[in-house]
Every structure is written in C-alpha cells, then in structure tokens.
Image (spheres, grey):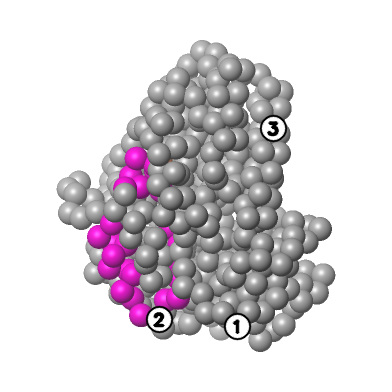
Amino acid sequence: MNKKVAFYTLGCKLNYSETSSIGRLFNQAGFDTVEFTNTPDVYVINTCSVTENADKKCKKIVKEALKISPQAYITIVGCYAQLKPKEIAEIPGVDMVLGAAEKFQIVDYITDLTKNPKAVVYNQPVSEANEFVPSYSFGDRTRTFLKVQDGCDYSCTFCTIPLARGASRSNTIEHAVEQAKEIAESGVKEIVLTGVNLGDFGIRNGKREDRFFDLVQALDEVEGIERIRISSIEPNLLSDDIIEFVSHSKRFVPHFHIPLQSGSNKILGLMRRRYRRELYAERVNKIKQLMPDCCIGVDVIVGFPGETREDFLDTYNFLNELNVSYLHVFTYSERENTPAAEMGGTVPGSTRADRSKMLHILSDKKRRAFYESQLNKTGHVLFEGDVKDGYMHGFTHNYVKVRTKYDPVLVNEIKTVCLTAISPDGDVEITESDEILVH
Ligand code: SF4
C-alpha cells in the first residue's frame, strides 16, 4: 500500500500553489495525498511569516497532527521555516525543517520516515534560493493559481518577505504558457496569476529578460483558458500598456488588486514604497476611464509607526474619495529584523484596532456601492462547487460575488447572467440572461 501524505497551508495564494506542487512531487514518488484527518504517514506544514502568531499556529497544527497520527513524520516548510528554523525545530514532534532553497527537494530529503528525537534542519541562506521553481495549484476545479514569479527586490520597511523568499526571479514566458495550456487541458476555466511581486516579472539569474506586459500578451493567446486574473500588482508597475491591453483583452478580466498601504505620502515614504498617492489615484482613474465596470481592490495597512490621527485620516479620506471597490485591511504588527520595527512612534494597539474597524466599515460601503453600480447589468459568472443553505456562489468577470439556488450542473460553468438585487447577506442575486457578454 502507498504511504500517505497530508498538507496544511498557512498564508498566501503563492503558498497554496506551492503546496499543490509539493503534493505532486509526493504523488510522483508514490505517495497518496489524503485529508489531514486520514492518519497520514507524513505531514507537510507550509508556513507563512506574515501570519499573525505564526509560531503558535505552527505548534497547534503539529499538536493536532500528532493527535491524529502519533507516528507521522512531520516536516515544516515555507517562509517561517526560512526565517526561524531553530524555533521551529524545537517544537516537540517536528522531524524536519526545510528552507526556501530546499522545499522543492523535499522528497529527496525524506529518505526514512522514522521519527527523529531532534528535528533536522536543512536551511541555506536565502541568497541561495535563486532558482525559480514554477508551481500551480490543483484540486479546485474552477480556478488555478499559477505562480510565475517569486521573491522581491524591493525593501518595504515593514516586510519580511524578501528575507524569507529571496531575490526577484521568474519563470520564462514559454514555460508559463506551456503550464497555462496544461491547466486549460485539465478543464480549469480560470487562472489567477500569482507572484510575490508579480509586476516585476521577467528577471532571470539577476538580469531583466522581459517584462510582465510581455507575459500578459503571450498568455492572452492561450486557447482553452476562459479567463485570467492578475492577483495583485504594485501601482508603480501597473503601466498604461497593461491597463490598455486588459481593457480590450480576450481573457484578462477587468479586475485589479493594487496595494496602496497608506494614503499619506509621509507614511509611504517611511514604508519605502515606490510611489506616492498621486500616482495611485492616477492609476485608478486610468482604469476607470477605460473600464468603468472594473473592480479594484486595495491593500492598506493601519497603525504603521509614526501614523498620526491626521495621517490616518489622510488615508481614510483618500480612499473614501477614490473609485475603488473593496479594501483588504491589515493591522500593522512588528516583525523582527525589519527597519519599521526599530522606528519610533509606535501606535497603541487599541488605536490600531479602531482604525482597522473604520476601514473595514469603509470597505463594506465601497463594496456595496460597487455591487449597486452593477445591478441591472449582465455579467459572466464562473460557478463554484460550494453549497451553503441550498445556495451556490460564483464570481463575475469583474469580481462581483453572486449566489443562486444550488444546481450541480452549473459547477465550473461560465454563464451570462443579469444581476438583479443585493441579498441580505451581501451577495448579488441573478437571473439568467441570453445576452452574450464581451468583457
Ligand atoms: S513589494 Fe514590498 S511589501 Fe511587497 S513583497 Fe516586496 S518588500 Fe514586501
């Protein structure tokens, strides 16, 4: 009988796509992937350095794993494993810790499944993690996260990602296109392009060889993929070329997620971000001018050191006036070995919480206004397989979340619908439409 492996992923889309790839490596080596609770022989826990209390969470997952399968071999990989290998190795029950350069050789490292009295650590400095290892997620039939870029050469003062994942590096366009074709052949309808700093795509072995825009144009020609979404792109890298191309593209949908982080130029400077709020507003205006129905999501951090009430209100008012559709609000928390953690002007926890709450309310307001602006319009919906209280969900091309009565035939289908009303739980109700929509 084959040995069994189970996975647990913390963190971002990139981690999910990497877990999937690691899963395929195990399958090629003769392991069966099973649910976390199905007494596996090996557990792989893919950690994140951005997750709040990463160490506590990691400990808890290890404990749960050992309750289910006391003899299971436990391996920890991911950003937190790169940053804090020693701490992780000390968690009781952990057998192996692999860093960023080693995680994709995991199957070679696991030679013997006998539990170790003390965890072994394979962790080279992150500067060794300079190879690009492509990956994409599978399992969810409707949508696949395709990783085309890894690492980051920026040095935002709050961020540990460059320390955990290393320098910017990318797949080749040819290989990314090949992977997109493979994904299309498997029946998946939507690709979400992911990377740590996706807009910086095109660096190989430390040299710029092409640009993100080249990749966008090449992927737009891949037959069989119905739609492609850009997961997130820095405002300074979202060029007019890209916006104009997406506005008439065959497959790229009108949805951008653009990190702002702060609407105060003073705070953007302290964060060492590579743009100011004026550029951000210009990007949003350009998008809306060409694609009035485009959905725009914003990442924003509250409580960064030195953020006064006025600075926060700058952010609040800037976002309030900006034509964006929803916010992802992050509460700043100190990370070891980052310049921000050494800055003065610490914002008290309760103030951070209040500011976060204000922006969450603003986000709800923005989302509702965006959804209302879409009522009585048509949209292409890709239906997903989840069922809740007899309803299923899906997202339109421009990221409106809709619901309809569960119908198994609709799962993984794209349908043209009319958006009719906002339901009590905030999703949009639909009716079928005969119109053919070209986005
Ligand atoms: S752009 Fe800034 S926030 Fe994003 S990964 Fe790079 S350093 Fe971190």
Disc 3 target residue: 358
Label 3: few (<14), some or many (≥20) within 10 Å? few
Q: Which residues fall within the magenta stretch?
A: 212-239
The Cα–Cα distance between marks 2 and 1, rounded to whole angstroms, is: 22 Å
The Cα–Cα distance between marks 3 and 2, rounded to whole angstroms, is: 43 Å
The Cα–Cα distance between marks 1 and 3, rounded to whole angstroms, is: 41 Å
Question: Where does the N terminus fall, quadrant-wise?
Answer: bottom right
Q: From the top left corner, tell me how far across and down residue 395 is, in percent.
A: 60, 66
Q: Quadrant of residue 404?
A: bottom right
Disc 1 target residue: 434
Mark count: 3
Q: Residue furthest bottom?
A: 409
Q: From the top left corner, tell me how far across and down residue 372 is, in percent.
A: 67, 55
- Describe residue 187's horizontal placement relative to residue 415 as left or right: left
Could you say which is closer to the camera, residue 78 or residue 88? Answer: 78
Asked if residue 321 can be seen in this view, the reply is: yes
Choose the circle earlier in sequence order: 3 or 2: 2
The amino acid sitting under disc 2 is Gly
The amino acid sitting under disc 1 is Asp
Where 320 falls versus 42 (above or below)? above
Choose the circle earlier in sequence order: 2 or 1: 2
What residue sits 81% from the left and 58% below the top?
424
Disc 2 target residue: 224
What residue sits 55% from the left and 45% below the top?
324
Could you say which is closer to the camera, residue 312 or residue 374? Answer: 374
